[in-house]
Image: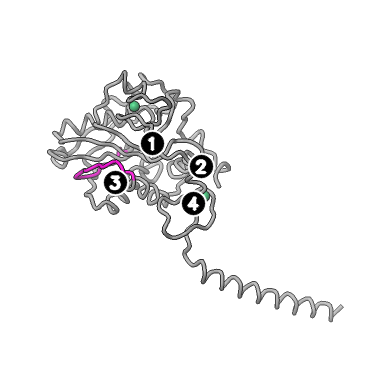
Amino acid sequence: MKTEIKIGVFGDRKGDKTKIRLRKLRSLLYADRPVCCACGCEMPRHRRGGLCEDCERESLKLGADICNKCGRMIANEAEYCDTCKSRERAYRRARSCFVYDGKIRKLVHKLKFGGKRYLAAFFAEAIADRYLDCDYDCDCIVAVPLSAKRKLWRGYDQAELIAEELSAQLRLPLISGALVKVKDNKMQARLGLKEREENVRGVYELTDAAPFKGKRVLVIDDVLTTGATLGEVSKVIYKARARSVDCLTYASTRSLAPTENILDEEDYNEDEMV
Ligand SMILES: [Zn+2]
Ligand SMILES: [Zn+2]
């Protein structure tokens, strides 16, 4: 019995030592090796945007086949989507990196409702690349703000986090605190097109117009759905006599049906996450 235990102990110790050596070797080989934000697999250091090759391939990257105005994916070869054909949006153009679907949708939820702030840096990398792709040329960045109440409740403002990272990456100044959300409106997610426009009217204000005057402004948000929010924000910024207002978001929805694109806390499910 005693011998058996000894053999066991020695055997385990030997095994443990081997395991430790392997772990050390592995940590030397893979020290700080980044992992994919969506699936958790290890990936090469040079990859930008936090997604491995497979996850990026599975996600719908936006480039061609988009609406010239709002940048959302369109199935036909039309120049503008149905929303932009029928509605005026104050911004000059909006563009996004991905279609808001699948893994991208989950990542947005993780940042927005799941407290995963580190994702902001990866979203900013993707947005910075998109900025260069679509030949934007802006003087400054501003984020679509949350109301003070909601920011306090959530602990952070996800669009502001992305904008901070983007500002560092593109070396463009970030205008902070000059654009505020003064009213907490209903969540946009469950509203129709017209209701969304009414819902955002008058909720954004400028506390200081000076930083926008004569500037080519880049507005940042996480998701564009119908463009109503970004349109309202752009309208407010134009009132400060900005030279132009362009928008960039990490993702944009592909359909008009708001119920297909739900984006609120009730739908956030931690179990869905990798
Ligand atoms: Zn992956
Ligand atoms: Zn459009």
Could you say whether the residue bearing mark 1 is in a helix, strand or loop?
strand
Could you say whether the residue bearing mark 3 is in a helix, strand or loop?
helix
Q: Residues within 10 Å of mark 3 (few under 14, many from 20)?
A: few
The residue wearing badge 2 is 58
The residue wearing badge 3 is 132
Q: Measuring 48% from the left and 25% from the top, which residue is drawn there?
A: 259
State which tag comes first along the sequence, 1 or 4: 4
Q: Which amino acid does label 2 sit on?
A: Glu
Asked if disc 4 and disc 2 are in contact, CB closer than 8 Å, the reply is no
Within 8 Å: ligand 1 and the Cβ of disc 4? Answer: yes
Q: What residue type is labelled 4?
A: Cys
Q: Which amino acid does label 1 sit on?
A: Val
Measuring from the top left, give residue 272's x and y in whole percent.
57, 41
State which tag comes first along the sequence, 3 or 1: 3
Question: In the rendered view, does 258 fall on the left or right side of 168?
Answer: right
Give the residue furthest to the right. 1
Measuring from the top left, give residue 44's x and y in whole percent.
47, 59
Q: What residue type is labelled 3?
A: Leu
Mark in the foreground, 3 or 1: 3
Q: In this view, does 163 lie above or below 9?
A: above
The residue wearing badge 1 is 223
Mark in the foreground, 1 or 4: 4
Q: Distance between the residues labelled 2 and 1?
A: 19 Å
Q: Distance between the residues labelled 3 and 1?
A: 19 Å
Q: Measuring 29% from the left and 41% from the top, which residue is drawn there?
A: 134
The residue wearing badge 4 is 52
Mark in the foreground, 2 or 1: 2
